[in-house]
Image: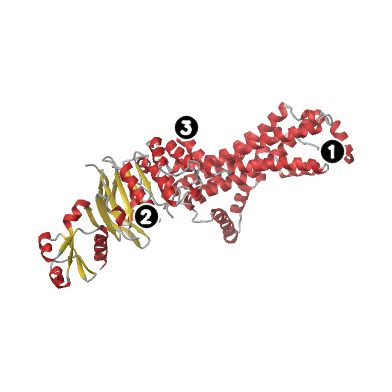
Amino acid sequence: MATLIDAQGLTKSYGATRALDGASFKVEAGRIVGLIGPNGAGKTTALKAVLGLARCDGGTLEVLGLDPFRQRNKLTERVSFIADVAVLPRWLRVQQAIDFVAGVHPRFRRERCEQFLARTTIKRTSRVRELSKGMITQLHLALVMAIDAQLLVLDEPTLGLDILSRKRFYDSLLSDYMDAERTILVTTHQVEEVENILTDLVFIDRGRIVLDLPMDEVATTYAQLVVMPDRAAAARALMPLTERQVLGRHVFLYEGADPGALKLIGEVHQPSISDLFVAKIQGGAA
Amino acid sequence: MSKFLWLIRRELWESRAVWVAPALCAVVIVGGLIIASIAHGTLTFDPQDAADVAQLNTMPPAKADAVASIALGVIALPFFILVLFTQFLYALDSLYGDRRDRSILFWKSLPVSDTESVLAKLTVAAVIFPLAALAAALMTQVIVFGIASVALSGMSVLAGHFWSVATWAGSLLVMGYLYVASALWYLPLIGWALLVSAWAPRSPLLWAALPPLALSLLEVIVLRSSHVAHAVGERVGNASLFGRAFGMSHATGFTFAVKMDKGTLTIPRALTDMMRPAEFFSSPSLWIGVLVAVLFVAAAIWVRRHRDASS
C-alpha cells in the first residue's frame, strides 16, 4: 500500500508557541484519516504543512513523494483541498467558478461537477454572495469532487453549518467521491459526524500525536466498562485511563485491557471517539 | 484557452473597473457635451464670437488640422489620467483582496502558481487597463467628432478637417506611444502596489504611501538632503513623463497654455513631431525604473508564496 503522506518529527513555532512539537504520522492510500484535536492543537498547522502553504521548522515531510513546500507547484494538480468553510470569493458566479476551474485544472471533469450541482438548488447565474453557507459548501464540494485528485484534504469543512448541511456534506463525500483510489485527510472537532466514515484515527494535542490507530483496532485496543459503585474499586485495580460517573454508575476506559477480565466486573462497550478523545486529551493534560 | 488567459478573465470578472471607469469617463464627456449644447441652444458659436468664427473660417488648412488634432488630444487626456489612478488602485487591491475575503485559500487550492497569479494581475494593471482606456478614448473621439461635424456642417471649414486620416493616424500614434511610455515609466509604481498588496496586514493604500513619506522625512532630518523625495516625485509626476517622452520642458508647456488662453490658437508644433522615442527609450532612468519594478514584482511573488495564507 502506497504511503501518501509521511511526516516525521515535524516542528513549527509561531513566536513562543510551539504549534507542532515533533508530530509524526503516515497516511496510506485509500484511507479516510481523521486528524482530531482541540482548538490550537496544531491541526491546521499540520494541514498547511501537508498542503505546502507553510514550511515546518524541523522534521521531514513527504506528500506523494514530494516536498510539499518546495515542490508545491507539482503537488497542486494531484492534491485538492477545502481549507475552511465559505472561502469561495463572494463576487464569483457559479458558472464562472466551474469555467475557471475547468480552465486551469487538467484533472477537473466538468460533467461530474454538473451532475453534483444538478442535485442541488444552486443556480448557475447566482453569485456566491447570494448563496447560503450550506450552498457555498455544496458548490465547493461539487468543484472539488469533480477533480480527480489523489489526496483530498478537508480542514473543518462543515464548521458553522446546520446539521442537515453537515450530514449532506459527508454523505456526498462517501457515496459520490470515495473509492479505493482516493484518500481523504479531514480535521474537525465535531467528532460524532466523522465517526462512521473514518478508517483511521489520529489525535493531536499540543503539537504532538497522542493516538494513531486504524478504526478497526479501536475496538480491540480500547474498552469502556460500566459498573455499579460497589465494583468501582475492582475496576480501578485494572488501571483504567479515565473514570467518570454517569447516573450513579461508574464508567471506565481501558487501553489494552483483557476483555474477559472486564466482563466479570460489569458491562463492556466499545468507546465512542468522543470518549476516547476526552480520555486521551485530558489524560495527557492531567 | 490557455491557463494564463483564464487568470486574466478571472481578474476581469472581479474588477469591473477595467471597463466601467473609462465607460463612465466617456459618458461624462459625451453627456457633458450634449447637455452643454442643449443649454447653449445649438453647438454653433455665439454670434458675439463672430470674430472667432471668421477666424475659424479663414484658418489655413494646416492650422485646422492642428486644431483637430489638439481637440483629439484634449478628449483623450482624461482617459489617460484616469487610468493612472485606476490601474494603481487595482494593483493595490488585487492581492490584498484575495487575503481579505480568504478566497486566497481557494485560489491556492488550484494548480496555479503564485508567479502565474501575480503576473496575471500585473498584466491586467499594466496592459489591460491602458488598452481599455485607449479603446474608450478612441470611441469618445469618434462620437464627439461625429456630433461636432453634424453641428458645424456648412458653418466652418474646420468640420472638413475632422476626418482627415493623417490627423487620426497621428493622434493614434501619439496615444499609443504615450500609453506604452507611461506603462514602462509607471511600472515601478505598479510593482510597488503589488508588493504592498501582497504584504499589507490592512489598509494597503496607507502602507503604499507611508514608507516613501517616512523615508523622505528621515532623509531630510538625518542627512538634510532630499534625494528620496526627489526620486519619488520625479517618478510619480506626470510632467516628468511628458517631458521625457515628448521633449517638453515646463517652459514650452507654459507658453502653450498662455497662448491658448489668449485665444490665438498658436500651435507650436504637432505632437507627433514632439515625440522623442529614441531619447525616451534610451534613457537610463526609464530602465532603472523597469529594473526596480522587476524587483518589486519578484518580491510580491515571494511574499504571496511565503506569507501565511490565512492571516
Residue B166 lies left or right of residue A245; in this view the side is right
**From this viewpoint, is residue A207 visible?**
yes
Q: How is the image coloured?
A: secondary structure
Residue name at image x 12 percent, y 62 percent: A263
- Looking at the rendered structure, which numbered label has been put on residue B1? 3
Place of residue A143 in the rendered image (x, y in percent of width and height, measured from the top left): 40, 42
Label 2: chain?
A: A
The answer to whether A278 appears left or right of B5 in the picture is: left
Residue at the image point whose x is 76% and y is 40% from the top: B34
Q: Position of residue B95 (x, y in %)?
A: 49, 48
Please report, as a chain letter, where disc 3 is located: B
Left or right, B262 with reference to A283: right
Q: Quadrant of the N terminus of chain A?
A: top left
User: Image point 36% across, 52% down: which residue?
Assistant: A166
Q: Quadrant of residue A285?
A: bottom left
Quadrant of res B25: top right
Both labels 1 and 2 in a single chain = no
Give the percent coordinates (x, y) of residue B5. 49, 35
The residue that mark 1 highlights is: B45
Q: Amino acid at mark 2?
A: Ile
Looking at the figure, which quarter contains the C terminus of chain A?
bottom left
Q: The residue under label 1 is which amino acid type?
A: Phe
**Residue B178 at least partly seen:** no
Please determine if labels 3 and 2 lie on a single subunit.
no
Q: Which residue is mark 2?
A: A163
Q: Which mark is residue B162?
A: none
